[in-house]
Amino acid sequence: MKNIVVLVSGGGTNLQALIDAQENGIIKNGRITCVISSKPGVYALERAKKHNIPSRVVARKDYSDAVEYSKAILAALDEEKADLVIYAGFMTILDDLVVKAYPNKMMNVHPALIPSFCGKGYYGLKVHEEALKKGVKLTGATVHFVTEVCDGGPIILQKAVEVGEDDTPEILQRRVMEQAEWKILPQAAALFCEDRLEVRNDKVYIKK
């Protein structure tokens, strides 16, 4: 049974999708053993509490810079004996030392079809604003392994979502979450926990 540690910074809708998948038996060989938040008082911590999942706050504001904060996060991950680390709306960029300690063991969900609308500065509503500005007919979500390159890690799963002509960024954001993010993030976690993901030459292969 693999230990899944989920990193959060806000409301925790992707965390809820993971919790639901765990309780519905979609994630079979892993369990969420800890939720770590970069801020105190966020609703994601309430979600963890409701489902009896241990949580801890490692507040970004308590540390002088990204390196010191990253060391604290790394120490917490080591203490929790994390096998898989999932970014679920975690809004803090960590230093490379964390990624190097957990190669191909950290995954993130991005609200676009990478390599479109990704990289530094592309997060939250900004992604959907840019997609609408460009007039794309399809957008979606991507689950990828986290590497030193922002949104540049090997792609695990992607799911496309249609863009409506009258969409606002908020409407599109909700549709991408409901139709893509909340589906493929738990699916990717399940595949990892079943040892079905193999990375070769920066590509992810899913074993049958």
Image (cartoon, rainbow, N blue to C red):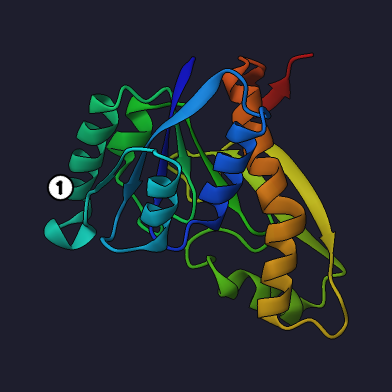
Residue 2 percent across, percent down from the top left:
47, 19
Residue 202 percent across, percent down from the top left:
61, 29
* Residue 170 horizontal side relative to residue 59, left or right: right
Which residue corresponds to the image point at 84% horizontal and 86% vertical from the top-left?
A: 166
* Residue 56 horizontal side relative to residue 124, left or right: left
Which residue corresponds to the image point at 20% horizontal and 49% vertical from the top-left?
A: 69
Residue 39 percent across, percent down from the top left:
28, 60
In the image, is residue 91 above or below residue 19?
below
Residue on which disc 1 sits:
68
Which quarter of the image is occupied by the C terminus? Answer: top right
Q: How many marks?
A: 1
Which residue corresponds to the image point at 87% horizontal and 69% vertical from the top-left?
A: 137
Residue 178 percent across, percent down from the top left:
72, 58
Which quadrant would residue 163 be assigned to in this image? bottom right
* Residue 100 horizontal side relative to residue 197, left or right: left
* Residue 44 horizontal side relative to residue 14, left or right: left
| Residue type, mark 1 in image | Glu
In the image, is residue 92 above or below residue 94?
below
Q: Secondary structure at mark 1?
A: helix
Q: Is residue 145 visible?
A: yes
Which quadrant would residue 156 be assigned to in this image? top right
Between 181 and 69, the one nearer to me in the picture = 181
Q: Is residue 104 visible?
A: no
Between 118 and 177, the one nearer to me in the picture = 177
Which quadrant would residue 145 be assigned to in this image? top right
Which residue corresponds to the image point at 75% horizontal and 66% vertical from the top-left?
A: 175
Mark 1 closeness class: few <14, some 14–19, many ≥20 residues within 10 Å: some
